[in-house]
């Protein structure tokens, strides 16, 4: 089976956001960042009230409000930060072949992905998992990288999905 597709910056951004959202270690880090700052705010309120010799409630309420805003708005900030960092990394390095036209040949033995920069090959045993979101199929070849296949480029999505599931049955999808 042969798939010809164009990988855009948006597809790559979607993969990074998807991966962060579905990674156990990234989720743990996100939650620590999201909830530790409000706890620090409360500690600062306590210390501030003692040092300034003011009632704790006067210091507590502003810091509590800042903590609530942090918890509510941090996810959007985090998502925007991931997007901007990813765009920055794409533009600063040598990324020829990452974006643009790809030709993926699906064989009995594995995947051969050809782009303007060359060719990569991976056996089916080298694919560690298949995941998907509304926009893309992701064939992970490590815990942090994947072949990104935009669904908009697939004429026979169900046929491609069934092919991958058959080849990756060893993964117990």
Image (cartoon, rainbow, N blue to C red):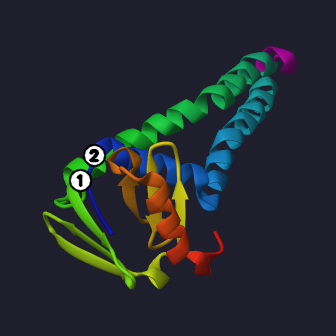
Tell me the quadrant of the picture where the C terminus can be found: bottom right
Q: Bounds of the magenta span? A: 54-59
Relative to 61, residue 24 above or below: below
Is 33 left, or right, of 131 in this rendering? right
Q: Is residue 120 left or right of residue 109?
A: left
| Residue shown at 70% from the left, 27% from the top | 67
The residue beneath circle 2 is: 8
The mark tally for this picture is 2
- Report the residue at 45% width, 81% height from top: 124
> What residue does disc 1 label?
99
Q: What's the distance in space between the residues labelled 2 and 1, CA to CA?
A: 6 Å
- Farthest residue toward the top? 58
Residue 131, how many percent across, how many down?
54, 59
Classify 10 Å Cα crowding around label 1: few (below 14), some (14-19), many (20 and above): some
Q: Position of residue 68 (x, y in %)?
A: 72, 24
**Callout 2 secondary element:** loop
Q: Which residue is depicted at the point 71% across and 38% down?
A: 40
> Tag on residue 58?
none
Which image quarter holds the N terminus?
A: bottom left
Is 40 placed left or right of 118 in the picture? right
Circles 2 and 1, Cβ within 8 Å, touching? The answer is yes
Q: Residue at x 48, y 46 (%)?
A: 17
State whether the magenta stretch is mostly helix, strand or loop.
Answer: helix
């Amino acid at each position: 089976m042969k798939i010809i597709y164009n990988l855009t910056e948006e597809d790559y951004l979607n993969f990074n956001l998807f991966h962060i959202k579905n990674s156990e270690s990234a989720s743990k880090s996100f939650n620590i960042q999201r909830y530790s700052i409000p706890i620090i705010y409360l500690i600062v309120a306590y210390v501030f009230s003692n040092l300034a010799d003011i009632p704790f409630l006067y210091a507590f309420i502003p810091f509590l409000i800042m903590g609530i805003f942090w918890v509510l708005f941090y996810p959007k900030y985090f998502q925007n930060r991931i997007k901007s960092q990813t765009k920055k990394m794409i533009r600063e390095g040598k990324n020829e072949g990452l974006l643009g036209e790809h030709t993926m040949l699906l064989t009995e033995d594995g995947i051969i992905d050809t782009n303007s920069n060359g060719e990569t090959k991976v056996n089916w045993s080298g694919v560690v998992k298949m995941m998907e979101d509304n926009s893309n199929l992701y064939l992970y070849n490590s815990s942090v990288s994947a072949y990104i296949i935009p669904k908009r480029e697939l004429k026979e999505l169900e046929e491609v999905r069934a092919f991958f599931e058959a080849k990756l049955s060893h993964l117990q999808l």
